[in-house]
Image (spheres, coloured by chain):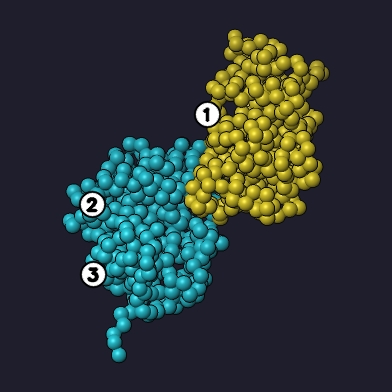
Chain colours: A yellow, B cyan
Amino acid sequence: MSHIPMQKRWTVKSRPTDEVRLEHFTLEEAAIPVPAQGQLLIETLLLSTSPPARMWLTSGGLSGKPIPIGDVMRGSGIGRVAASRHPGFSAGDLVSGSFGWQTHSLSDGATLNPLSKVQAPKDLPLSTRLHVLGASGATAWFGLLEIGRLREGDTVVVSGAAGSVGAIVCQLARERGCRVIGIAGGEAKCKWLEEALGCAAAIDYKHEDVGARLNALCPGAIDVFFDNVGGDALDAALAELAIGARVVLCGGTSQYQHDGAWQGPKNYFHLVYRQATMAGFYVFNFADRFDEALLPLEDGVRNGTIKYAEERYEGIEQAPLALQRLLSGENFGSTVISVAAE
Amino acid sequence: MSHIPMQKRWTVKSRPTDEVRLEHFTLEEAAIPVPAQGQLLIETLLLSTSPPARMWLTSGGLSGKPIPIGDVMRGSGIGRVAASRHPGFSAGDLVSGSFGWQTHSLSDGATLNPLSKVQAPKDLPLSTRLHVLGASGATAWFGLLEIGRLREGDTVVVSGAAGSVGAIVCQLARERGCRVIGIAGGEAKCKWLEEALGCAAAIDYKHEDVGARLNALCPGAIDVFFDNVGGDALDAALAELAIGARVVLCGGTSQYQHDGAWQGPKNYFHLVYRQATMAGFYVFNFADRFDEALLPLEDGVRNGTIKYAEERYEGIEQAPLALQRLLSGENFGSTVISVAAE
């Protein structure tokens, strides 16, 4: 009997009603597929996951279409072309795309992005392209500067401040002469915000009254609130907006598990009292301007002025655990699943 | 015994916990005051009232300071100078200001606005300065055009559409080539929206499912939602925003009686899905541009292209009833209390 190389993949087994657990997924094995003419085979190297993935399992979130039961769980990452019958790709090329939670996948190339040598320099971990030098970095940049219309000297409050996007927002605002207050869960994250990222203060929402702390730190003085979390943190910040404040809606991590029953911000009318604006955005609308964000962020990572934390899981077997820890806030930094040697 | 001329005034007796009722006010009589040097005595002719007045009785709303118990109820209107010892005013001058619910008041002139002959033309009712040609008109204009950034051809949904501001919003949008859908309570108001104000459709929130109607009329297609109401109407509209939509927060009539326990919009995250903006504003920030709004509105009222409805109460004794009916939605059009012959 000859050895047949196998791939592994996680499919959606059932829909969670509250927290995501291992039981909602099935780990399957299958023969590694062979590319037809015009296709290529990708070996997944790295996967990232982020809190909105929770919504893909039920309401569908932005798309409104949940992943069908039995389908491979959705997820973006970086892969290497293992075999190509496509004129645009050669074996060994690095690509990024939405491969799903699987070790191997076929593609017709249409939705892949080749990673140039410039985008994968040897002196920076490849995984940075999945967070600080990828979508998280662009989200922080355009969210804060374009949607948040940041001005020097602003008082900036960030929820989910130790998260993949939040940590970059804190540092970009700090670099621009702003006073930054981060909200995060637990002492370790808060210490990191204050000591490594330059936050003027950090609020531990697990052990402190966020509203009382904001009222003490910046009463009626929040110029920009960058929200990754929603829920009580959003209400607490709305109550302390400055005149003309901008609320940047980026994420709603505290609510993704509450499909259809989100906690609406009861303080939303403070937008009227404070002549303030609350806006959502889609980072890929800025796709043709990503270099504006990613080149300076790359410089920052190189020279140490932009710091990041990464929580790395070894093996695709860990993917459900990675998502589970991310949604419960137990993670620290951006989540990366290492699937194969880079 | 000589006859002493008396004034009447409504003071705040107690704070409502839900609906406003007559028992929350006291009707007092007192001698008409005599102006000292630098003061003038104003005879109130007309008063207006609007839903936010409910908040002044409890949380204080925008100011955060409720009217003290025993103080005269706050309210704006138009008055005539009855006697003046102030160099800037003469007996007979018309002025607008926040006189409170009283037949007579003293002023040092600082917060009064003289009404020029241009602003009180003989061919238009003086009361129009309290709504369509006053703050309501300016609110509709700047809210829709500046905050809502109205574009020709937009689909515009207006809650409280038959109200003092809403009715003007509907007509301004209609005039600019927009498809307008009004939400109001009851058949009479809905008929008026469709037949007199040019709305493409009207939704009777008291007898229809607003979400289902919006989903049928403009699924995912609301470019501007002008909200005077909050609560369920706001949530229903958020669920049907177009990409890039603007939500103009003007009022929250459905929530003013729920101090501190407002219903937050559970669909607020649709602002993210639709890359939309929700903004509050303070109309008096546009005070130096009011003519931009009020001159064309005056032309419109004259030539019949801008219609308005007015619910008139005779005598200051009716003021609490007027507010009560306004808050319960039983009113029709702008509320005006006629206090003395014009």
Three-letter amino acid code of the residue under disc 3 = Ala
Question: Which chain letter goes with mark 2?
Answer: B
Expressed as whole percent of the image width and height from the top left, the position of residue B184 reads 36, 57
Q: Cα distance, mark 3 to mark 2? A: 20 Å
Task: Confirm whether circles 2 and 1 share one chain.
Answer: no
Give the class, few, some or many, for how many residues have Cα within 10 Å of label 2's Cα (few <14, many ≥20).
few
Give the class, few, some or many, for how many residues have Cα within 10 Å of label 3's Cα (few <14, many ≥20).
few
Q: Is residue A205 above or below residue B91?
A: above
Residue at 38% across, 79% down: B30
Give the class, few, some or many, for how many residues have Cα within 10 Å of label 1's Cα (few <14, many ≥20).
few
**Pick the front one: B238 or B319:** B319
Task: Confirm whether circles 3 and 2 share one chain.
Answer: yes
Task: Confirm whether circles 1 and 3 share one chain.
Answer: no
- Circle 2: element type: loop
**Pick the front one: A11 or B24:** B24
| Residue behind mark 3 | B341
- Circle 3: element type: loop
Three-letter amino acid code of the residue under disc 2 = Val
Residue at 37% across, 39% down: B150
Three-letter amino acid code of the residue under disc 1 = Asn
The numbered mark at residue A285 is 1
Tell whether label 1 touches label 2 (CB within 8 Å). Answer: no
The numbered mark at residue B118 is 2
Q: Earlier in the sequence, mark 3 or mark 2?
A: 2
Expressed as whole percent of the image width and height from the top left, the position of residue A142 reads 58, 31
Determine which quarter of the picture holds residue A267: bottom right
Camera-near label (2 vs 1) is: 2
| B113 sits left or right of A300 in the view | left
| A131 sits left or right of B13 in the view | right
Q: Is residue B310 visible?
A: no
Q: Cα distance, mark 1 to mark 3? A: 60 Å
- Circle 1: element type: helix
